[in-house]
Image (cartoon, helix red, strand yellow):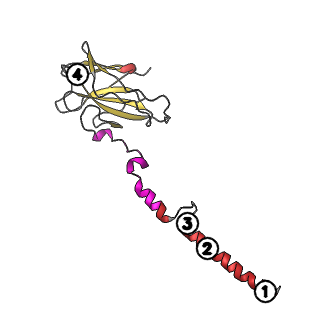
Amino acid sequence: MTSLRRLAPAVSLVALLALTACGTDTDSGGTTPTEESSSAEETTPSEEAPEAPLNAADLTIEAGANGVDLPDGIDAPSNGGTGAAWTAEDGYLYVVTFGSSTCPTVAEGEATLEGSDVVVTFEKVEDNKPCTMDMRAWTTVVKAPEGVDESADVTVKLDEAGSVVLTPRAAAGQVGEAAWVEQS
């Protein structure tokens, strides 16, 4: 019985050392630090998180460029909606929509001509995609069809949202005044 009493502290010490050694080699997730760092190195930035959209104030004037918020020179309507304005560069429109920031309504990059009206269509949002219930402006640069007279009033049909009439720019090189579809 005496030999068991002497042996118990030694067994306890061995067990404690074994547990301590196990605890320092791994984290609570069960992987070693070298495994974590190597798996982090294998992922690319595009796999980690989606790239943030451009701010509309920083958009390049080219067909299909789009970003969040409003471009410089355009004031938001008081209650959201859909609108358009001439960019400072001839031949291009800003088309602005308000809605979910995760499922924005984005205009297609090129408009068509229907009689004398400019027609803008919107890309369809996936039906099964989860969308946030926030309200954010989204701006798309749209190429106007050839032959549109920007020095006169131009009717722009904004898909199912409605129509607006754009007036000529106040001066060359300036953003035109935004026109908004009336909300009912």
Q: Which residues are magenta?
A: 36-60
Name the disc covering residue 3, or none: 1
State the residue in front, 172 or 106. 106
Inspect the magenta stretch and tell me whether residue 146 lies in it.
Answer: no
Q: How many residues crowd around disc 1 within 10 Å: few (fewer than 14), some, or many (20 or more)?
A: few
Residue reaching furthest top? 115
Name the disc covering residue 119, or none: none
Name the disc covering residue 20, or none: 2
Inspect the magenta stretch and tell me whether residue 43 lies in it.
Answer: yes
* Residue drawn 30% across the image and 33% down it: 74
From mark 4 to mark 1, how far is it between C-alphas? Answer: 98 Å
**Disc on the earlier residue, 3 or 4:** 3
Q: Say what secondary structure mark 4 lies in.
A: loop
Which residue lies under the disc numbered 4?
Answer: 145
Q: How many residues crowd around disc 2 within 10 Å: few (fewer than 14), some, or many (20 or more)?
A: few
Q: Are marks 3 and 4 in contact (CB under 8 Å)?
A: no
Q: Nearer the viewer, mark 3 or mark 1?
A: 1
Q: Is residue 122 above or below residue 130?
A: above
* Residue drawn 32% across the image and 27% down it: 108
From mark 3 to mark 2, how far is it between C-alphas? Answer: 11 Å
Which residue lies under the disc numbered 3?
Answer: 26
